[in-house]
Image: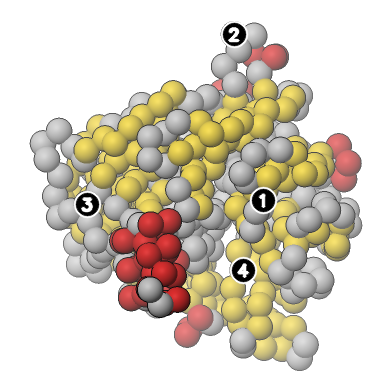
Amino acid sequence: MSSIDFSLRVRLSRFGLSVFCAAVIGASVSSASAQWTQWGGPHQDFKVDGATLAKEWPDEGPKTLWKHEIGDGYSAISVDGGTLYTMCRTKEKNKKERREVVMAINAKDGEVLWEHKYEAPVAPGHVAEFGLGPRGTPLVEGDKVYTVGVSGHMNCVDKKSGKMVWAHNLWEEYKGTFLNHGYSSSPVAYGETVIVPVGGKGHALMAFDQKTGDVVWAKHDFDNSYSTPKIIKVDDKDMMICFMAREIIGVDPSNGDLLWSHGHKNEWRQNITLPIWTAEERSLFITSPGDGSENLKLVKDGDGYKVEKLWENKKVGVHHTTAIRVGDCIYVSAGGSGGGPSFIQALDAKTGEVKWKERGFAKANFLYADGRFIVLDEDGNLGLAECTPEKFNIVTQYPILKKVSWTVPTLVGKTLYIRDQKQIMALNMG
């Protein structure tokens, strides 16, 4: 047997024929669709590359592969290979004794592989009406998992065992911005660092060494909000953008230097929804429930950048759900932040004009895959929808979770992972 034949057999037996063939056909496609290791997915845009989904569901809804109970929280589900990572709060009857949990779950059957539990009492002033968290999503990078809990407890654990590597308390150690709905941002990796918003004087953003937890840099005085940083490419250089409490900012992720800032205020200081960057237009879409939506253009200005406003629409503001751009339209679920009606809406990305707005779902999160939108609303209704600049068409819809379903779904291959505050489920979307 030749060395090539032997190598082929080993790889087939170890990884399975389908995985190996996918790697041979195109590693770039398979790597993008085979994992979801951070908030927003591979490209932080809630889009899935190369997915092939069923055109419709049976009357009873998509096939459930498995489901298990899970504790309180809105943490989304990260996927690395055959393992899921998420967070919740334990279910002791005495709420004061409940702990936060970082957990690893077998993607095949939903069985828990390990749990890392730690004491994490909610801070005084936390609004318990909307749950005790956690809210952030695990970041899987290399052989480690990075998380931040509802009271600012940051943990780095080994992804195979859940064993603690290092930890910080962002609110106690660094006097970060207290948020009455709890810390909600998710960590983001850059180079050999992991970056998180902290808020407050001198450390609005902080970068920690991935291996040791040592502070690499800490800069700026902006107050924190509930959004997650996003890495974009501008003029072939990396830039990190982050929604703070009263503005959106752009920094150099290697050292934290401020490149630009743009005010975007609302009375609750709730800037949450992940911005949309369109590189070919140099445009940045931002939205919040109080200040509406804006499309900004980043223009080079000496060593930094200046911001030009392309348009604004004060009537359309997204609270804490996803916004996705496809072609020249931006699709959002707007309204409903005060309990009122919510609409799926299409905004013209060039002008900000509302192309259409339709009912059919309560306040909802989206994923975009195989030319369609997977929609999960806060009432637990899951649906497939066709959204174009001309129309909104619900292809199929099925009640599947309970209130309040605020967690963004995760799609890897043909498997959709969803959760509410009671259970986590895997569904076959093929």
Image point 26% across, 44% down: which residue? Answer: 428
In the image, is 143 to the left or to the right of 290?
right
* SS at mark 1 in the image: strand
For label 2, the SS is loop
Query: How packed is label 1: few (under 14 Cα within 10 Å), some, or many (20 or more)?
Result: many
Per the image, the residue denoted by label 2 is 93
Nearer to us in this view, 417 or 220: 417
Q: Which label sits in the foreground, 3 or 2?
A: 3
Identity of the residue furthest to the top in this view: 93
What's the residue type where badge 1 is placed? Answer: Lys
Residue that badge 3 annotates: 430
- Look at 49% across and 63% down and name the residue there: 42
> How far apart are labels 2 and 1 at the CA level?
32 Å
Q: Residue drawn 37% across and 52% down? A: 411
Q: Position of residue 134 (x, y in %)?
A: 61, 34
Mark whose residue sits in front, 1 or 3: 1
Question: Where on the picture, by quarter, is residue 210?
Answer: bottom right
Give x and y (percent) for residue 162: 66, 38
Distance (Cα) linking label 4 and label 3: 31 Å
In the current view of this chain or complex, which residue is farthest to the left?
A: 59
Question: How far is disc 1 from disc 3 in space, using C-alphas?
Answer: 31 Å
Residue 61: x and y, percent? 18, 37
Q: Amino acid at mark 3?
A: Gly
Query: Left of 113 or right of it: where is 365?
Result: left
State which tag comes first along the sequence, 2 or 4.
2
Between residue 69 and residue 105, name the one nearer to us: 105
Residue 231 tag number = 4
Residue positioned 51% across, 48% down in the render: 78
